Image (cartoon, rainbow, N blue to C red):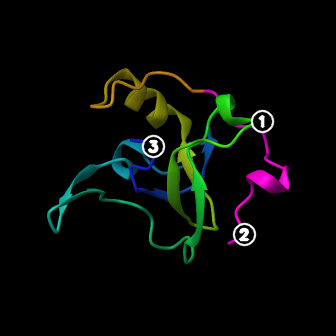
Amino acid sequence: MKNPQLRVEAQVYVLTNDGKGEDFMKLTAHGKRNGFNQALNIPNNTGTPVRYDGSTTGPGYNEIGSPLQVTWSVRPKVVKVDINSVGKWCEGNVFKEDHAHGVRNLVTNPALLSDN
């Protein structure tokens, strides 16, 4: 299915090594809320999310748009996260994520940008 009607709630994190960052293990807690799978600890002090239509991301979509449509909600303020807690999360999580993935280049082609 090319249009799974995905909705992404996003928070940008900056990794720190000064011991003052948030615990990634706590930030990534998830479970059911009101019958829906949810990220339970998305920070509530990082501004009103900016909502826009877009697509999935990744380096495979640097020159073409993804066929998968997504509604994004991204909070405007960043959160500092302790890099050691990210390493701990990578050692064991239900998603079996253990390394960084490729990212999309900054999209500048107007044909690939949302009007919103």
* Residue drawn at point x = 77 percent, y = 38 percent: 105
Amino acid type, label 1: Glu
Indicate which disc, 1 or 2, sits on the residue closer to the N terminus. 1
Q: Is residue 61 visible?
A: yes
Do the CB atoms of the residues marked 1 and 2 lie less than 8 Å apart? no
Q: Main secondary structure of the magenta part?
A: loop
Magenta part of the chain: 102-116
Q: Nearer the viewer, residue 10 or 20?
A: 10
Query: Image quarter for residue 78?
Result: bottom right
Do the CB atoms of the residues marked 1 and 3 lie less than 8 Å apart? no
- Residue 13: assigned label: none
Q: Is residue 20 visible?
A: no
| Residue picked out by circle 2 | 115
* Residue drawn at point x = 37 percent, y = 47 percent: 28
Task: Please tell me whether mark 2 sits on a helix, a strand or a loop.
Answer: loop
Task: Please tell me whether mark 3 sits on a helix, a strand or a loop.
Answer: loop
Work out whether 47 lies above or below 89.
Answer: below
| Residue picked out by circle 3 | 2
* Residue drawn at point x = 55 percent, y = 36 percent: 83
Left or right: where 65 falls relative to 21: right
Q: Residues within 10 Å of mark 1 (few under 14, many from 20)?
A: few
| Residue picked out by circle 1 | 63
Residue 1 in the image, given as x and y percentages of width and height = 38, 41
Q: Residues within 10 Å of mark 2 (few under 14, many from 20)?
A: few
Amino acid type, label 2: Asp
Left or right: where 3 falls relative to 115: left
What's the distance in space between the residues labelled 1 and 2, CA to CA? 18 Å
What's the distance in space between the residues labelled 2 and 3, CA to CA? 21 Å
State the residue lying farthest toward the front: 1
Do the CB atoms of the residues marked 2 and 3 lie less than 8 Å apart? no
